[in-house]
Amino acid sequence: MARTDRLLDLLQILRRHRHPVSGDVLSEELGISIRTLYRDIATLRGQGADILGEPGMGYVLKPGFLLPPLMFSQDELEALVLGVRWVSKRTGGALGQAADNALAKIAAVLPYDLSDRLDDHHLLVGPAQHPGTGMEALTQIRLAIRREHTLAITYEDQAGAVTQRVVWPFALGFFDHVRVMIAWCETRRDFRHFRADRITSLEETGQRYPRRKPVLLKEWRASQAIP
């Protein structure tokens, strides 16, 4: 393994640990000697990484550090580009534009040899089969989720029945053909899934729902037996 790749791997391992991790654990995971690990930690510290700890005490990386210039492995770069292209083509609207802007910002700070690879188009994302389906509502739903605000919606189900609901939106699922809002429904007193293209009207109430979004998401996962 090249030393640059090893230093990046060491940073990633440290980022995964909130508490100090011993040098023995780090060296074993990287497949290097403990002496080489100490040299790598010294190198990262010299480049500005705020790594706390010492031999026998363990090491922890304080948050907020990026290697200048921003570095990615080839696999990481391909995953990043593929994901951004998917969002750009399959979501559209403000989220799609934000994906394009994010990729442009990343390209601006990458070294030349890596930024050049952003134009490598061997990983392709096909066009959405139903572009624009439910797109009008997606930005409002995302903002309501971000603010943890309730939504008053008019919803038409598969049978054509129309109901008025007040819901607590906490997640938005992007599938190939549909976009699905996951929410707690005050009418049903349970979790419900709402297709965005069947929401005929919605309005953010400006009122926060009484339970936090992470709690709702955890409860929903448990109800769906999702690990």
Image (cartoon, rainbow, N blue to C red):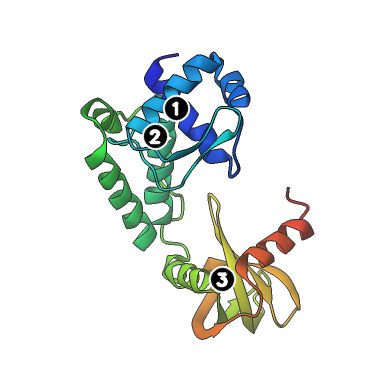
**Residue 200, horizontal then vertical, whole percent:** 52, 78
**Residue 142, horizontal then vertical, whole percent:** 48, 67
What amino acid is found at the position of numbered circle 1 in the picture? Ile
Which of labels 1 and 2 is toward the front?
1
Q: Quadrant of residue 152?
A: bottom right
Q: Residue 124 carries which label?
A: 2
Residues at marks 2 and 3 touching, judged by CB atoms closer than 8 Å = no
Query: Gap between marks 3 and 1, in whole Å?
Result: 54 Å
Q: Is residue 3 left or right of residue 106?
A: right
Residues at marks 3 and 1 touching, judged by CB atoms closer than 8 Å = no
**Residue 36, horizontal then vertical, whole percent:** 48, 16
User: Which sits in the foreground, 62 or 209?
Assistant: 62
Mark 2: few, some, or many residues within 10 Å (few <14, many ≥20)? few
Say above or below: 137 vs 37: below
Which badge, 2 or 3, is on the more N-terminal residue? 2
Q: Which mark is residue 41?
A: 1
Q: In this view, does 142 lie to the left or right of 173?
A: left
Q: Quadrant of residue 42?
A: top left
Give me the residue at 48% from left, 27% from top: 9
User: Which sits in the foreground, 222 or 121?
Assistant: 222
- Secondary structure, mark 2, is loop
**Residue 128, horizontal then vertical, whole percent:** 44, 49
Q: Residue 198 carries which label?
A: 3
What amino acid is found at the position of numbered circle 2 in the picture? Leu
Say above or below: 124 vs 180: above
Which of labels 3 and 1 is toward the front?
1
Which badge, 3 or 1, is on the more N-terminal residue? 1
- Secondary structure, mark 3, is helix
